[in-house]
Image (tube, rainbow, N blue to C red):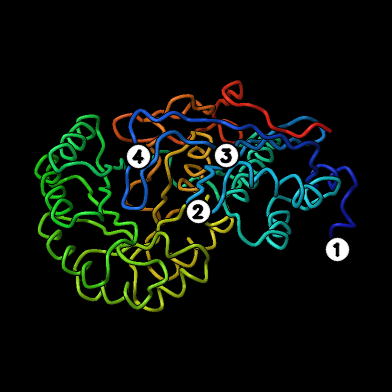
């Protein structure tokens, strides 16, 4: 203990020390209204994990793990790691706070970013509830009270894609992203049809999910630029820094990394190479809020944009990412936090998209309601 800490009254120290009383887990299945199709995969219902972390007084925070097996994690594997590897680090000890506890977990588990995100979200939700404050106040404070949200357009025919886009526009959405990458002609035709349907005032991006080669990217994006394309996300392989820099030097469309940035060091590498104009931050895929803030700080210092991105999932996850976005001043391009609207049996409730915008919850912690009767508890019997 430092000299400054030793000089504090014991009551103050007791109030500020983080203690964990109990950890519980629930499996949840979120039903999709329509199949989600990208260049990388086609997926139906979502099997996910909710983690609840309580202090000794019973104040509980909740975190959500999307369990994207495509990224190497599942609900069963996460539960095994949580209860066998991480429990001894988390419980039975005192911690200075969530950030220091997450630093210890990072030493115990290098990968498994989705699991660490869910744990960190639960810790922050619990801490903010104890302080009776919205979660964004633990992340730097509120920068904006609401944000435009971006709707994703999955792989369909150009005509059906344009129809979906027009439906979103009529509901007030001003930011949309087209999934592309399987058929060059279809992709260009779809963007053209969408632009004609929604007009010039809608922000349009495309996401190839790293399916194009650098030369292919230049050819397709050059053609797409004729239709007012505002942003191109991860056109080529995640680790191809030279390829991303080549693409950016040859087209007049801003280039954003997604899968290419999992760590602050990767963000620095791409920026130094002149390879990107922005980074898509998925908190569940970079290891949590504090890691996301590190990436955002690097981007801000280098005049590089930041964009909050996600995969379709529960409002529990999206509420956390919304608090992050609302406390990060360099956000642009709308927040990709609208896909919960296409899910059923969501244990999280309370977020509401109005005229294409999402208001930040102002209640304590995440600020939403959570109904765990929609899940099945999987906490091991003690």
When the figure is inspected, residue 345 is found, relative to residue 364, above or below; the finding is above
Quadrant into which the C terminus falls = top right
Q: Nearer the viewer, mark 3 or mark 1?
A: 3
Q: Do the residues labelled 4 and 2 touch (CB within 8 Å)?
A: no
Where does residue 139 sit, x and y in percent of width and height? 57, 50
Where does residue 341 sit, x and y in percent of width and height? 38, 30
Distance between the Cα atoms at labels 4 and 3? Answer: 20 Å
Q: Are marks 4 and 1 in contact (CB under 8 Å)?
A: no
**Mark positioned earlier in the residue sequence (4 or 3):** 4
287 and 290: which is toward the camera = 287
**Mark positioned earlier in the residue sequence (2 or 1):** 1
Residue at left 56%, top 42%?
65
Q: Is mark 2 on a helix, strand or loop?
A: helix
Distance between the Cα atoms at labels 2 and 3? Answer: 16 Å
Distance between the Cα atoms at labels 4 and 2? Answer: 16 Å
Residue at the disc numbered 3: 64
Q: Do the residues labelled 4 and 3 touch (CB within 8 Å)?
A: no
Distance between the Cα atoms at labels 3 and 1? Answer: 35 Å
**Mark positioned earlier in the residue sequence (2 or 3):** 3
Q: What element carries label 4?
A: strand
Residue at the disc numbered 1: 2
Q: What element carries label 1?
A: loop
Distance between the Cα atoms at labels 4 and 1? Answer: 52 Å
Q: Residue 71 carries which label?
A: 2
Residue at the disc numbered 4: 36
Asked which quadrant contains residue 112, the reply is bottom right
Q: Which of marks 2 and 3 is in front?
A: 2
**Mark positioned earlier in the residue sequence (4 or 1):** 1
């Amino acid at each position: 203990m430092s000299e400054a800490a030793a000089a504090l009254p014991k009551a103050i120290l007791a109030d500020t020390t983080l203690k964990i009383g109990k950890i519980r887990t629930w499996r949840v299945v979120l039903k999709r209204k329509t199949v989600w199709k990208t260049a990388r995969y086609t997926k139906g219902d979502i099997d996910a994990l909710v983690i609840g972390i309580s202090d000794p007084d019973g104040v509980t925070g909740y975190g959500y793990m999307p369990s994207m097996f495509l990224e190497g994690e599942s609900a069963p594997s996460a539960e095994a790691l949580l209860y066998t590897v991480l429990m001894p680090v988390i419980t039975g000890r005192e911690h200075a706070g969530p950030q220091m506890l997450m630093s210890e977990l990072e030493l115990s588990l290098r990968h498994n970013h989705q699991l660490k995100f869910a744990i960190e979200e639960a810790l922050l939700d619990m801490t903010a509830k104890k302080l009776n404050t919205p979660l964004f106040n633990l992340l730097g404070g509120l920068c904006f009270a609401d944000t435009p949200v971006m709707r994703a357009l999955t792989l369909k025919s150009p005509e059906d894609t344009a129809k979906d886009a027009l439906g979103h526009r009529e509901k007030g959405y001003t930011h949309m992203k087209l999934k592309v990458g399987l058929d060059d002609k279809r992709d260009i035709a779809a963007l053209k049809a969408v632009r004609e349907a929604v007009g010039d005032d809608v922000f349009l991006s495309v996401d190839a999910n790293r399916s194009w080669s650098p030369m292919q990217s230049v050819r397709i994006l050059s053609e797409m630029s004729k239709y007012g394309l505002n942003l191109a996300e991860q056109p080529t392989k995640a680790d191809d820094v030279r390829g991303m820099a080549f693409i950016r030097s040859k087209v007049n469309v801003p280039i954003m990394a997604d899968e290419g940035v999992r760590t602050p060091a990767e963000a620095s590498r791409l920026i130094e190479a002149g390879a990107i104009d922005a980074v898509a931050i998925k908190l569940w895929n970079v290891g949590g809020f504090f890691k996301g803030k590190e990436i955002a700080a690097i981007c801000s210092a280098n005049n590089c944009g930041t964009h909050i991105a996600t995969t379709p999932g529960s409002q529990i996850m999206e509420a956390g990412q919304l608090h992050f976005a609302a406390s990060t001043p360099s956000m642009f391009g709308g927040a990709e936090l609208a896909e919960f609207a296409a899910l059923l049996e969501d244990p999280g409730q309370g977020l509401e998209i109005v005229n294409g915008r999402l208001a930040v919850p102002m209640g304590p912690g995440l600020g939403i309601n959570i109904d765990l009767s929609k899940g099945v508890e999987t906490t091991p019997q003690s």
